[in-house]
Amino acid sequence: MRPASLRLPADTPPALWWVLLLPVLAAGLLVHWAAGVAVLALVIIQRARPLDFLTSYLMVVALGSFMNYGSGQLTYEMWILTAFLAFSLYCYALSRRWDALVIPRTPATTPLLLFFGLTLVNYIRGLMIGNSARYAGLELIGILAIVSCLLVSNRRLSEGQIRAAIVWLWMMGFGHFVLGAYVYSVIHARTIGVYFEPVPGVVSMILFNFALREPKRSRVLLWLLAMTPLLAHQFLSFTRGFWFAIVAGVVFSVAIYVGRGVGVRARARRATLALAVLAGVAAIGVIGIGLGLGIGKIWELAGSRVASSTGTKYTFESTSNVVRLVEYFHVLDLIVEQPIFGHGLGYSFLVREPMFFKLLEQWFTHNNYLLVTLKQGLIGLVLWVWMLIGFLRVGLNGRNLPNLAEQSWCVGAAAVVVYCMVYSLVMFPLAEVNTNFTFALAVGAAMRMTATDTIALRWKGRRSLPETM
């Protein structure tokens, strides 16, 4: 028996915790402080929910949403994301054991697989013709993030898992709000990048559909209040693409909820009341932000942004419109050169910036549809639009599910697709990982809830496993 002086205190952490602390410190010191925080979160969460696929995937969703393409450290960040994704795949393999992959039969399955196959072909083709390997890799991982919805669709989420996922998504969206508000308070000017991503808008689409279908009125207010910081983040960006995408998503959600037939008037009144409350809460939130961050005449500033949306006169407010038009015409000329098959992944081009007349190299263009056509031709564009319509149909197929949580999630996923389809007209949200993993989570869960059948790809012969793993 050890002497009393040599015994460790009863509250001393187990030796395993000290061992797990080593990779946390190593990641923080040798890579980046964010890497250390990410590894620490992984350790803590895995102690609570060891090797759970959904938990590990939610961590990938959150980490992916904060990738900063303009930080100059994107390679480091992508390696961290890749490590978390590999761990999530390991958890997935453990959960499936005998079934490598279960593919649900949905309207989105065929176009998704075809577009993914075309992307792999154009990735290899792009490398063979000398396109940038770095840019090709960035584009490929963005598509892989969308395809990861097939992993999510391998399990049907229980109602408790759905609500846990929503809480996680809200916390992630609130983190984006805090980041955006902080940056605005420092520079007092509109900015873009990781500080103002579409993620809060995407999450708000899901929350809004839960609010519409919440049976208890007291909880409806809680859902709408939860949306407030997310909508405030999108407003504070002063990005018209976010605003129009939210309006489109909300209008779509209300139209699907009200529908027709028995009870349409009651649903219409309920939706109108929800919209009125949401508008009031959002207005109060915007005024509070304006006062807190010192943004004078915030409504006038917002009005000028909306008014300049269709302006082509070269003024300070419409400069971005002129810049985009110059870029679009240049990209259209490049598309004409290779209209059927495109230029392959990793292709970049030079565009003259109209303000200071500098030549800039871009692998992207501020329109997701043009971007797909530029890299993968008209064949890719057809498959891309077919895939988005398929995801939209997946969500709509769940609008009459008996379970309200599943019904709300599915229509929310459809609203997410509408949001991204509209925002893709002015940006490229589905070419980056920030939005793609959140998008994949939303549509992947809806795919399993509405699947008519499944195809199990097994690596060993064994009797079929239960649907919910």
Image (tube, grey):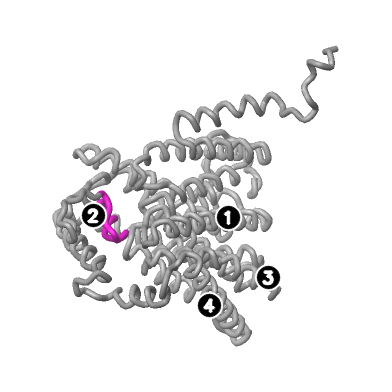
- The label shown at residue 219 is 3
Say what secondary structure mark 2 lies in.
helix
Q: Which residue is mark 2?
A: 374
Quarter of the rendering occupied by the C terminus = top right
Q: Are marks 2 and 1 in contact (CB under 8 Å)?
A: no
Counting other residues with Cα less than 10 Å from the Cα at mark 1, is it few (<14), some (14-19), or many (20 or more)? some
Amino acid type for the residue under numbered disc 3: Arg
- Residue 369 is one of the magenta-drawn residues: yes
Quarter of the rendering occupied by the N terminus = top right
Of marks 4 and 2, which one's residue comes earlier in the chain?
A: 4
Q: Which residue is mark 4?
A: 279
Identify the magenta region: 363-376
Q: CA distance from mark 3 to mark 1?
A: 18 Å
Rendered position, 361 above or below 128 = below
Along the viewing direction, whichever of 364 and 115 lies nearer the viewer: 364
Q: What secondary structure is the magenta-colored segment mainly?
A: helix
Q: CA distance from mark 4 to mark 2?
A: 39 Å
- Image position, residue 89 (x, y; %): 52, 38
- Image position, residue 232 (x, y; %): 49, 66
Given this view, does label 3 or label 1 mark the residue nearer the observer? 1
Q: CA distance from mark 3 to mark 2?
A: 46 Å
- The label shown at residue 171 is 1
Of marks 3 and 2, which one's residue comes earlier in the chain?
A: 3
Given this view, does label 3 or label 2 mark the residue nearer the observer? 3
